[in-house]
Amino acid sequence: MDFKTLFTLLFNSLETGSGYALAALGIVLIFRTSRTTNFAQGTIGTFNAYIAASLMMRLDINIWVVAICATITAFSTGILIDTLIIRPAAKVSAISKQIITLGIIMVLVGLMPILFGIDTLQLPRFFESSQSFIIAGATLQYNTIFIIVLSLALMGLMFYFIQYTKWGLATRVTASDETTSKLMGVPTKRVTMLSWATAAIFGTLAAIFVAPRVGVNPNMLLTVQISAFFAGTLGGFSTFYGPVVGAYIIAFSRNFVQFYISDIWGNVIVYTLILVFLYFKPYGLFGKKPNKKV
Amino acid sequence: MTLVFTIIDSITKFFHSITKPLHGRPQAQYIVFGLLFSLIAWLPHLDVIKWGTMGVFAYIAIYTIVALGLNLLLGFSGLISLSTAGFIGAGALGIGVFLQLGWPFELAVIAVVLISAAIGGLIGLFSLKVDGIYLAIATLFVGEILSQIYKQVPIFGGQAIRIGSIEFLGNFELSMISQTDRSILFMIVAIIMGLFMVLMHNIVHSKTGRALLAMSRSEHAAQAMGISLMRYRLIAFMSATIFATVGGIMYAIYFQNVPTTSWGLELSLFMIAMVVVGGFKSIYGTFIGVIVIHGIPNLFLKDLFGDISYIFSGILIILVIIFYPRGFVYIGHDIKKYYYKLKEKFKRDEVTNNDN
């Protein structure tokens, strides 16, 4: 085992892990505040990445401005989806709500070819891939560092926000018991709306991060989305940091298993291991068993 | 206006009288339903519909079988499974593999069903430990592992398995290429759908169905009544996987060309959508759900709107769930209620008019 491959794998895993972590954080936010599994997380991100890419193509502005525009459209998409679709369906059962997010996927995926055409669009890196330096033989791009630092900073901000601000408190109480917090005067509707908006932003950032490698197409976030779900289960949905830790674990183990054991069966091995792990710890690494009343 | 009411009333009365022998005999109803559905097989011969349209109807029958099994989990047991598509694939591809190995069709069916039921049983055991969203995503793991296996293991043929023709009982060979054979294949699929509706009805109205319902309301209360969680969880998951596998086998029988790549999360979500949109705990509701999710887009919307049909089906799902959270099957009830209200109102107006 040489250091070059080890470091390459390490940086690679940190980069993909950041994407998974952002998506997973979005999923857990919505899961806790809206009580639904958001299958549309990836599609919402993809949709806004399409907006970014077509803005870039038509107006020829640089990636930084485009990324900021995409964040703003993501924020509005999140709010629109919550007000138009999720809130009117507040009373339907949990499973039906999940299927509503399937409806959102279909609408957005159907809109993509009409609005943006059927070609795969391109989004460049934040820093050119030539801008890099070398650690122990492994190339480390500035772009990779930027992605890792930005995601960690965003997540840190998010945790600070949830833990130490008034709005964060509102989010936590909404997550723990919506009815009671509503009775206590917490604006649960606004909390839910903001968490949809934040989740959409996280999804969009994840999409912009992976876009240079896979191109902007309707299925670009499929792996990220599924991995984010797996990260949520591995880390446990009952905390906000669990899924983030889970995301990095999944990215690392997948990369290392794929490189050192089997390229084709890497995913299957990792998934089986997680399933076995879940059998012994059914609520994930940091999850607590919910109290069930008889 | 009175004339319209009289006509509608007499039509319903007439319908009521011809279906009289079926009242109170739900099993017979399902069989008749399957037989009526199988009549679609002769429509393309009469040039009423295209051959491709019959394929859509075959999909409807196949998905109905699968969705019934899923309804046993979602509706009756309150459990969710995201690996349904993986098991449809297991049925369809498994048949292909065994037929290519030279096994007789009947033996292949038994082997495939047994293998799937075993995996379903494992998930059932797993579900004793894990619940809620964790269980849902655990089944997603299983689905992903299965679809990865289909794509990577060379025995599944890479892109697709071509079956060509199927030999029933060793000498009765049916091929997709011949049009008459295709109609017979469609009838087989439709009748099997009817039989599985009967099977579902019997499961639901047996001790097992009641136990599953009790478990979905409260596991602790059910256990206190002496219901074995393990036994019925196993039954629920095994029956759901068997239904899905049979759906897959029907796919292999009818289409005789099974792709390896279409058995992912998206199809599983669509299967759940069919149950949710159609109606939990309702057999006809499940069928209606399949019609809404698969039938309407493929039969009408595609012709009307072309590429944007996908958007319309998405909006349809969202609207149905918001306005009929218990399932689309209750729309019949609403229409009836509205009709009687209208009739009463009209009668009242008439009386007041006469008084004046």
Image (cartoon, rainbow, N blue to C red):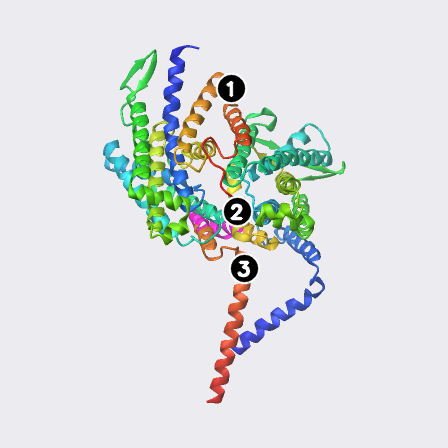
| Label 1 sits on residue | A262
- Label at residue B330: 3
On screen, residue B47 versus residue A185, left or right, reads: right
Q: Please, which chain is the residue tagged with disc 1 on?
A: A
Q: Disc 1 and disc 3: Cα gap in Å?
A: 51 Å
Q: Position of residue A85 (x, y in %)?
A: 39, 51
Is circle 2 on the same chain as circle 1? yes
* Residue extending farthest bottom: B356
On screen, residue B111 versus residue A134, left or right, reads: right
On screen, residue B83 versus residue A150, left or right, reads: right
Which quadrant of the structure image shows residue B114? top right
Element assignment for label 3: helix
Q: Position of residue A64 (x, y in %)?
A: 24, 32
Identify whether A27 is placed above or below B21: above
| Label 2 sits on residue | A293
Residue depicted at 66% across the width and 40% down the height = B231
Q: Which residues are magenta?
A: B292-314
Residue B262 appears in the figure: no
Q: As shown in the figure, which amino acid type bears the numbered disc 1?
A: Ser
Is B346 within the magenta? Answer: no
Q: Disc 3 and disc 2: Cα gap in Å?
A: 32 Å
Q: Nearer the viewer, residue B179 or B25?
A: B25
Cβ atoms at labels 1 and 3 below 8 Å apart:
no
Element assignment for label 1: loop
Identify whether B46 is placed above or below B16: above
Residue depicted at 32% across the width and 29% down the height = A152
**How busy is the neighbourhood of tag 1: few (under 14 within 10 Å), some, or many (20 plus)?**
few
Q: Nearer the viewer, residue B333 or A22?
A: A22
Which quadrant of the structure image shows residue A144? top left
Q: As shown in the figure, which amino acid type bears the numbered disc 3?
A: Tyr
Q: Please, which chain is the residue tagged with disc 2 on?
A: A
